Amino acid sequence: MILGEKIIQLRKQREWSQEELASQLGISRQSVSKWESGASIPDLDKIIKMSSLFGVTTDYLLKEEIEEDNLPVTLEAKETEALRSVSLDEALAFLELTRKTAAKIASGVACCILSPVCLLLLFGLSEYGNGNRISEDMASSLGMTVLLVMVAAGAAVLIFNGMRLEKYEHMEKEPFVLTYGVAGIVEKRKEEFADTFRKCITGGVVLCILGVVPLLLFGGWNERIAAIICLPLLLCFIAAGVFLFVWAGSINGSFDKTLQIGDYTLEKKEVSQRTSFFAGAYWCIIVAAYIGTSLYLNNWHKSWIIWPVAGVLFAALYIILGAAVGRKKP
């Protein structure tokens, strides 16, 4: 039984005309007529309102019931039956939780990017502070303390919010099927967010580019300003840009995960499972290299360059690894 048939059945059980149902929903009779004929599908808010009005669940309204005894059993049908089914309630709960945690996760990433700022400022004061100079050892110890505290805080935020999303991990890693009507609702939300997503990506790129401008302007003219102000300012611009990338990307990614499109198609999920080891191993090596190099050379205010280089290298290696695993797929 499809959605239109269920609306007709529930309406007639209460002996309501199309006009009476339309009046209670605050819409026109023509809209109800289109729903019942299958010419259109109700918006999410109308489905929720009908669920309350008729005393049924949204799953009942949206899930298309099929008489399986009348269908031939094929291999494809058996595979589909074995897949996890994602209902409207579960999909909406996942989208809402992602929306709530997106800003926090973005803040955690930005905090990690900003962590060297205090260290750079203190090293600048130790070298060019004139009357306000502090010793290099003090700058190193105090700056590293702040850096580690900020990294720890950022990591805590990332871990805590990542654990909140763990119960929906299957949305990212496992194949599943959506119940009737869910795809249309998620696609509509994705379209509504598309303009915000484009603005955030554009704004993030602009911020990252503008962050280099002060460094270029003052780098050759005044080394003190470049060391004390421009370099930390660059990290601030990058942190703001990355915040926009992560926030908008998390929300947009939740739509892609639900619809299983973009980076979350069935094929890419299989590749992702095979390459999941890479990110953890890679960044452990980078952290060890950063700490070891900085301690050996005692050059903390310059060794930070390892991070942007590592980020670019990670993207390149991940693409190569994904392509290699994809080619080996049986």
Image (spheres, helix red, strand yellow):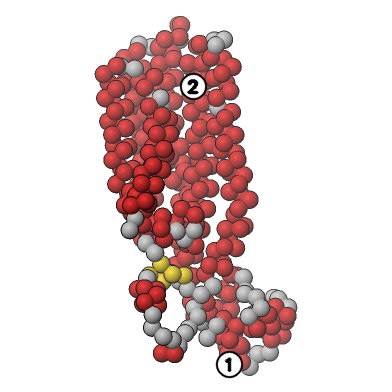
Residue at the extreme top of the image, as rendered? 130
Neighbour class for label 2 at 10 Å: few (<14), some, many (≥20)? Answer: some
Q: Is residue 27 above or below residue 99?
A: below
* Left or right relative to 26: residue 129: left
Amino acid marked by disc 1: Gln
Residue displayed at 39% across by 42% down: 320
Q: Which image quadrant is residue 211 in?
A: top right
Q: Is residue 224 visible?
A: yes
Towards the viewer: 130 or 78: 78
Towards the viewer: 128 or 180: 180
Q: Which image quadrant is residue 281 in?
A: top left
Please identify, in this view, whether the residue under mark 2 or under mark 1 is nearer the observer. Answer: 2
Residue holding disc 2: 231
Whichever of callouts 2 and 1 sits on the residue coming sooner in the sequence is 1
Amino acid marked by disc 2: Leu
Residue holding disc 1: 13
Neighbour class for label 1 at 10 Å: few (<14), some, many (≥20)? Answer: few
> Looking at the picture, how far across and down is residue 255, in whole percent?
51, 58
Q: Which image quadrant is residue 143 in?
A: top left
Secondary structure beneath label 1: helix
Residue displayed at 48% across by 28% down: 235
> Looking at the picture, how far across and down is residue 256, in whole percent?
50, 57
* Left or right relative to 75: residue 99: right
> Looking at the picture, how far across and down is residue 138, in whole percent?
33, 16
Q: Is residue 100 visible?
A: no
Q: Is residue 164 above or below residue 15?
A: above
> Looking at the picture, how far across and down is residue 303, in whole percent?
36, 22
Towards the viewer: 73 or 64: 73
Secondary structure beneath label 2: helix
Q: CB under 8 Å between callouts 2 and 1?
A: no
Residue displayed at 47% across by 16% down: 227
Label placed on residue 181? none
